[in-house]
Image (tube, rainbow, N blue to C red):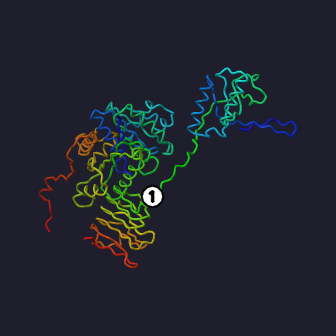
Amino acid sequence: MDVRADPTRQLVRLRGRSYVAFVFSPAVPIVDWLSEIDATLARSPGYFVGKPIVLDLAAVDLSGPAIAHLVGSLNDRNIRVLGIEGVEESRLAANMPPLLTGGRACVITRSEPVKAEEPKEEPRPKPTSLLLESPVRSGQSIVFTDGDVTVLGSVGSGAEIVAGGSIHVYGTLRGRAMAGVNGNSSARIYCQKIEAELLAIDGYYQTAEEIDVSLRNRPAQAWLQGDTMKITPLN
Amino acid sequence: MAKVLVVTSGKGGVGKTTTTAALGAALAQGGQNVVVVDFDVGLRNLDLVMGAERRVVFDLINVVQGVAKLPQALIRDKRLENLWLLPASQTRDKDALTDEGVGRVIAELSTRFDWILCDSPAGIERGATLAMRYADEAVIVTNPEVSSVRDSDRIIGMLDSKTVKAEKGEQVKKHILITRYDPMRAARGEMLTIDDILEILATPLLGIIPESQDVLKASNVGSPVTLNNADSAPARAYVDASRRLMGEELAMVVPVERKGFMDRLLGRRAA
């Protein structure tokens, strides 16, 4: 929000701007209230560091020296008070934060400080195989470039499986299977029933049309021999 | 606790709306409090099939956007007093639906009804995903054709990943309903068989609705087929399906071609 005061002489421009600040509303006894603050600080040290804080003293009746003492106590805890509201101006000494008026409530989204990083465990070795216990449905794409993919179920028409290693399907393979995508030419594709739309190993592929009709609906495996793809029945 | 059931398919024209109306009416006939909700914003049909098109004032979008209260938009069926319709808007499109808005409407409906049947639009876009979003159960309507079966497979994958239940690590209970099953064409091997479909979709079967003129006739007079001609084969199949949804175990009836007298006399042409 920018409010521009009418410049009388082009020299000094005054601008108003509103900011969001945390409001502290101390309650009596002040000592107990301060220990509450200490408890918060113990949970998340540095929570208030660098945050603008306003003291709302409407709920308490403090004398000038008492206000000075409160501001000092907060200062000791690294909490700097930006302004004070809800008190007569006469009670504020010149060296104290200024009196504020016209504050409106708003919602503050809490951003918890980042916790100190826990000591990291030894990075686990990456899994070298992926097991899928449900059928792979049409439109789903399973990409696992780190190793083998095993499917307990069918691979639907229009689904695809991309594996760095071999692909094992304990069900009907109706979709696409692409094995050895990282240049692993010894990867193979196995399935209990072959009705695949496309088979590929290390970039060499065959479409459904090229797969021998006599193999269809039978357990089969595909592998690479040089640059030709072999598909043979499994039993 | 209300059950939220989405009737979905992926493919269009397989009979989602007919099924929603027929199952809704059958459940209501069984004594349940039922509301059928049309999610096909912009292409609404459920009001026509339910015969309520002349009584639509407010719709789902109005309720989602807070323009109207839910009781203002609900239309009570004239034949069954415990069957209600929440129509879709014809003038808006699916972008008018919001996730929170739909969730709020479903939550409010849950306090009043035993069953909330969501009639999903075809496709896999916003309308379809929001229709299935809060579902506890799903009826996947499938025709015995490869295109329909593949689309159903896709939808099952989405039910397992895009619903609130799936995101919580639970499962939406899924049922396959095969519609437009033609025994004559099945006998000639011109259609996928029931076994083929179930093998591909790997999901339990809720019922088989035979292809029938009764379905078309009922739609044209604005009546769910289970109300319009309760003795017809499709009506009986829908009633069985609704009883299975209620947890009854019934033997599955596979529609067979009924042979007339002449067929028996002249069944086979000699070679």
Q: Please determine whether, in this image, residue A13 is positioned above or below residue A105.
A: below
Residue B11 appears in the figure: no
Q: Residue at x 63, y 26 (%)?
A: A26
- Quadrant that contains the N terminus of chain A: top right
In this view of the protein, which residue sits in the foreground, A190 or B115?
A190
The answer to which of A184 and A215 lies nearer the viewer is A184
Q: Is residue A151 above or below residue B114?
A: below
Between B222 and A112, the one lying in front of the other is: A112
Can residue A5 be seen here? yes
Question: Seen in the image, is A198 located left or right of residue B27?
Answer: right
Task: Please state which of residues B198 and A128 is positioned toward the viewer in this rendering.
Answer: A128
Q: Position of residue A84 (x, y in %)?
A: 70, 28
Q: Is B256 situated above or below B115? A: below
Vertical side of B158 occupied by A189: above or below: below
Displayed quadrant of residue A184: bottom left
Image spot of residue B65 (x, y percent): 51, 37
Say which residue label 1 marks. Answer: A124
Determine the image quadrant of residue A83.
top right
The amino acid type, in three-letter code, at marker 1 is Arg
